[in-house]
Amino acid sequence: MSVLNFENNSGQGPSNLTQLVSEEFRDYFQRNTNLKLIPQNGDLQFEGQILSFNFSPAALQRQGELDVASVNRLTISLQVRYKNNKDSKQDFEQSFSAFRDFPQNQNISQINDADIRRITEQLVMDVFNKSLANW
């Protein structure tokens, strides 16, 4: 299998977001399959892009005259292209999104790589289930 880098086309997120997402794909598939990872042209090929890295209020509550966020949500969306060179009927191109909620007093600059990895893990599991669940 091969996993090309998921370029960050969102214009947002940490400078290492491409690396975090791409490496999570590689690591997850290596941990959960016996497929050999090669740089390119694998029997199974994953590629795509990071579409969005969005930090926004998720739940509003009224405090006096103001609506205030009770939690903030970081959502990451990917566009994934999967090509199965052994069975082209399995090919797909699809968007995937996952999120994690944070306390209202935590801002985007306080989100660390571990938090982003948790979101990325969910994205990778969703892609894994879509691509290889029928094995």
Image (spheres, rainbow, N blue to C red):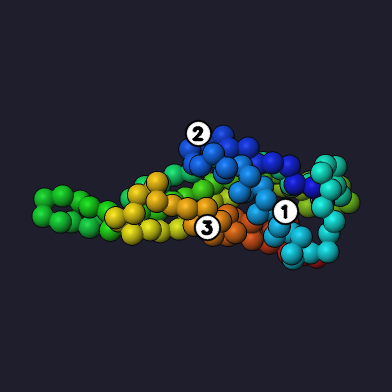
Where is residue 57 drawn, in percent x and y?
A: 33, 50
Q: Residue pushed farthest right?
A: 86
Where is residue 124 drawn, in percent x and y?
A: 64, 56
| Left or right: where 16 falls relative to 70 | right
* Residue 66: image tag: none
Q: Report how far apart the C-alphas of labels 1 and 2 lie in the structure.
A: 23 Å
Which residue was labeled with disc 3?
114
| Left or right: where 2 falls relative to 63 | right
Where is residue 40 drawn, in percent x and y?
A: 83, 42
The kind of secondary structure element at disc 1 is: helix
- Tell me the kind of residue under disc 2: Gly
Q: Report how far apart the C-alphas of labels 3 and 1 lie in the structure.
A: 17 Å
Which residue was labeled with disc 1?
26
- Tell me the kind of residue under disc 1: Arg
The reply to whether discs 2 and 3 touch (Cβ–Cβ < 8 Å) is: no
On screen, residue 34 above or below 79: below
Residue nearest the viewer, comparing 131 with 38: 38
Q: Nearer the viewer, mark 3 or mark 1?
A: 3
Query: Which residue is depicted at the point 85% across and 56% down?
Result: 36
The reply to whether discs 1 and 2 touch (Cβ–Cβ < 8 Å) is: no
Task: Specify which label sits upstream in the sequence, 2 or 3.
Answer: 2
Q: Residue pushed farthest left?
A: 64
